[in-house]
Amino acid sequence: MRTIDGIEGPTAAPAARAALAFLALILVQGLHELEHVVQVTQRFVLGNPTGAGILGSWLDIEPVHMAYNTGFLALIVACYLIGGFPGEVRRRHPVTFWLMTFVLLFEGYHVLEHVVKMAQFLETGMNGTPGIVGQFVNLVWLHFTYNTVAYLPLLVVFFADGYHRVVGEVLSSAARRGPGPAAAPP
């Protein structure tokens, strides 16, 4: 199996794990980004002042945002480490190293915003608290921007470092193998 930059042999499995983890990162944040695009469209194009996105009417509470962004940061950290960004990638692909490092630090700040918003939520019992920067900027646009700034560099890294090719190879290899052996009855 060819992997990132033609790596084969014993390092193929870790490269496949890194690519699949990165795919999860791209898909999860892609859906979150879509949620924010819908919310911006509802509010500023369709004129719905309470537009909350696709799932927002059920999930638009600060504890959910805090949990999501903390989980997203954990997935970024996992991809950063599994993908070898502190070591090999830094030497061979400095641009993607710096993009991933930027996303890691930026999302760390985004989580800090949600920690402040969570403290405000607990103090006031009100949803939609401003956080730090939200005191000065519209919250819908702010979080749309935060999520876009975190997502676009991830897409660049996913394609520039060849993770998309590895995912394709892993999935086509799995399809060729077919379903695994059936579990034995108890």
Image (cartoon, rainbow, N blue to C red):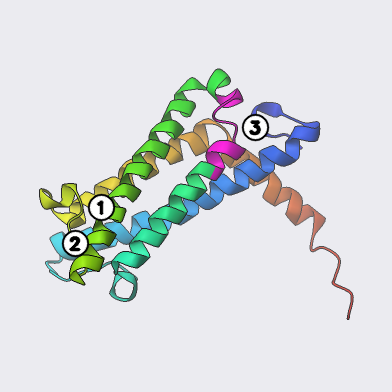
How far is the residue under mark 1 from the one under mark 2?
A: 12 Å
Q: Say which mark, if any, is on residue 143.
A: 1
How far is the residue under mark 3 from the one under mark 2?
A: 43 Å
Q: Amino acid at mark 2?
A: Thr
Q: Which residue is mark 2?
A: 129
Q: Which residue is mark 3?
A: 4
Along the viewing direction, whichever of 86 and 172 lies nearer the viewer:
86
Q: Quadrant of residue 79?
A: top right
Q: SS at mark 3?
A: helix
Q: Is label 1 or label 3 in front?
A: 1
* Left or right, residue 186 beside residue 141: right
- What is the quadrant of the N terminus in the image? top right
Q: Quadrant of residue 52?
A: bottom left
Identify the residue at image location x=51%, y=38%: 158
Magenta residue span: 78-89
Q: Amino acid at mark 3?
A: Ile
Q: Amino acid at mark 1?
A: His
Along the viewing direction, whichever of 43 and 131 lies nearer the viewer:
131
Mark 2, Cα crowd under 10 Å, few <14 / some 14-19 / many 20+, is many
Is 79 inside the magenta-drawn segment?
yes
Identify the residue at image location x=55%, y=44%: 78
